[in-house]
Image (cartoon, rainbow, N blue to C red):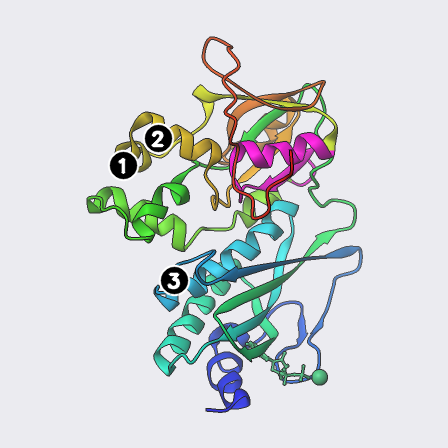
Amino acid sequence: MGEFELINHYFAAAPCAQGGEGVALGIGDDCALLDLPPGEQLAVSTDTLVAGVHFPTVCEPLLLGQRALAVAASDLAAMGATAIGFTLALTLPDVGPDWLGAFADGLSRMAQRCRMSLIGGDTTRGPLSITVTVFGRVPAGQALRRSGARPGDLLCVGGTLGKAAGALPLVLGEREAPAEQAEPLLAHYWSPLPQLELGQRLRGHATAALDISDGLLADCGHIAKASGVALEVNLAQVPVSPALQAFLGPDGARLAALTGGDDYVLAFTLPAAALAELEGVELHVIGRVLDGQGVTLRDAQGQDITPAQRGYQHFRETP
Ligand code: ADP
Ligand code: MG
């Protein structure tokens, strides 16, 4: 099958590539065209997943399709944006029709959940790598940035943490677990749900936000730095799922929740007064914003128990 046949059969014909709100022109021309309502800004983000680095070389293509789009769409959630569409730059080894069909199916499932359309891409031959660029819209000036946290604000997260890090030994085949533990962890790893509705609800309330991809403490460090403040996390308030507790035990679960990557849960700051206006929204207060810099983890007695290793980085900072 040639390049154009492949694009047409698996991608242009996929349910997620049939257009939608905001898509004036999809796959087939030199560019896609997007319509933005007056007064809105375009939010753009790109993410690459490389086989053997971000996912095991041998894995289910349907799950991979879901995950590739979910991790990219999570950045739109973190900005408070509404998803419009995405492009797909795919580098493929010699994969067969079953692989392509299942991968496109996974993409379409996640696209439907996030209400976004596949609008273009690029297809090349080489070691498996997937780059997804997402496009969203947000009312001008209302995007949730990392830089607005103020001393006195509360620090919150949008769900339990550490499940994807807990799933990693299962994904890599290094460990096994009973189904009631393994299933929720694997589901979160392969099909994280970008918190798009939460991000949109937080517009006008949150002072800073991001999605946790490299671990809670590491990512809180980005808010602290961009906002010029200190963040304090109270260990006892960090939400951990029962499945993760059962699988890793309390200490292991805590470590995964604090430093494990791939959560794609939102972390954000807001003034305490905003809590009343966010009734019904899943949020967990885990700490507060103070004058100063950096991130401190405290135990129930208020002792500083900040671990040395805070998260994952592809390129380490030189000391
Ligand atoms: P060009 O050479 O003009 O860059 P291509 O020949 O690479 O265009 O692609 C033809 C059309 O198919 C374009 O609209 C492009 O966006 C789309 N496309 C290519 N690869 C993919 C893909 N993997 N998924 C979705 N659309 C794709
Ligand atoms: Mg062209």
Of labels 3 and 2, earlier in sequence is 3
Determine if residue 99 is in view: yes
- Please tell me in which quadrant of the rendered image residue 290 appears: top right
The x, y position of residue 23, in whole percent, is 65, 71
- Residue identified by numbered label 3: 63
Left/right of residue 141 with respect to residue 93 in the rendered view: right
The x, y position of residue 6, in whole percent, is 49, 85
The magenta segment: 203-226
Q: Amino acid at mark 3?
A: Leu
- Residue identified by numbered label 1: 247
Between 168 and 25, the one lying in front of the other is 168
Left/right of residue 232 with respect to residue 142 in the rendered view: left
Of labels 3 and 1, earlier in sequence is 3
Q: Secondary structure at mark 2?
A: helix
- CA distance separating discs 1 and 2: 9 Å
Determine if residue 148 is in view: no
Residue drawn where x is 69% and y is 38% of the image? 146
- CA distance separating discs 3 and 2: 26 Å
Left/right of residue 161 with respect to residue 80 in the rendered view: left
Residue drawn where x is 45% and y is 38% of the image? 260
- Residue identified by numbered label 2: 252
Considering only vertical position in the picture, is 143 above or below 299?
below
- Quadrant housing the N terminus: bottom left
